[in-house]
Amino acid sequence: MRINASTTGIMASSKDILTTGIPPDERVYAAITSALLHGKLAPGAQLVERELAAAFDCTRGTIRKVLARLGAEGKLTLEANRGAFVPSPTVADIREVYRARQVVEAGIVAAQCGALTTQAKRVLRAHIKAEQRAVKAGSVEECVRLAGHFHVLLAELANAPEVLAFLAKLVAKTELYKALFDPSKLSNCASDEHGRLVDALEAGDLDTALATMRSHLDELEARVLAQASGARTSDLATLFAGA
């Protein structure tokens, strides 16, 4: 599916990006990333080089560089001889990734329960405060990033590099699912749930810690699945006007 229907929803997020003095590729990268994280690009939509070059008033070489970067980060799907597309996971794909997170993160919780150092507790509490500030500021991108990084941080503190690498990939996928199918839903529930989880870990209450993590991931999955069948389309010229 190519982006060919008219909308005005993304213009505000693109215009919010400060462009003065920013290299063209960074300007384009920031605008497309912002559009993705605000849920303004439809799953499966094709990002056509010539249309993007016209929308951003830059060269196709610049667009090619940005699309390659976004593909390497997993934010876009690059198909040989076809182009760049917004990822379009199936319901089964989404469920599989969240199931993997449930299994991996249950192990991390078990390893960390009652074993957090004073420094680890301080780091986690500081992170939760940063999440709360992002919610208060209404920053969608920062909320998504911090909410996902909390889980990666738990794995980092567990000192298990291979588990960390695997979980980081899973979290990156679910961050994108959240952006595609549950955009702009700002609430303090993530930081509240993270706070309750840290409380249980500090207290050494494994049953509560596991239940809290399980419930938290179940809720995130349910939100995404509830919207996964929806569709959004956008006109590139309108989408990135003024970016």
Image: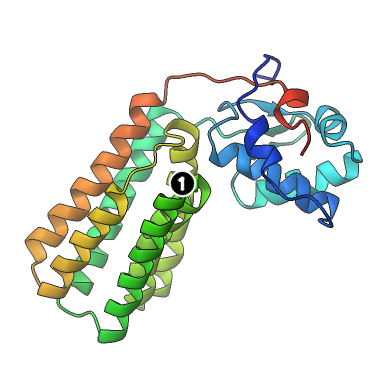
The amino acid at mark 1 is: Gly
Residue furthest out toward the bottom: 118
Residue that badge 1 annotates: 138
Residue 131 occupies which quadrant of the picture?
Answer: bottom left
Q: Quarter of the image for the C terminus: give it.
A: top right
Identify which residue is drawn at 68% across, 15% down: 6
The percent coordinates of residue 129 (x first, y second) are 35, 65
Total marks placed: 1
Local packing at callout 1 (Cα closer than 10 Å; few below 14, some 14-19, many 20+) is some
55 displayed left or right of 218: right
- Residue 242 visible in this rendered orientation of the protein: yes
| Residue drawn at point x = 76 percent, y = 44 percent | 28
Q: Residue at x 21, y 72 (%)?
A: 111
Q: Quadrant of residue 151?
A: bottom left
Looking at the image, is 105 positioned above or below residue 102? Answer: below
In the image, taking residue 162 as reference, residue 141 lies left or right, namely: right
From the top left corner, tell me how far across and down residue 146 is, in percent. 43, 58
Query: Of 40 and 137, which appears nearest the observer?
Result: 137
- Across and down, in percent, residue 233 comes to 61, 19
Q: Image quarter for residue 128? A: bottom left
70, above or below 125, in the image: above
Q: Is any atom of residue 170 visible in this view?
A: no
In the figure, is residue 156 to the left or right of 69? left
Q: Residue at x 39, y 25 (%)?
A: 227
Name above or below for residue 104 compared with residue 108.
above
Q: Residue furthest top?
A: 5
Question: Which residue is farthest front?
Answer: 136
- 147 on left or right of 192: right
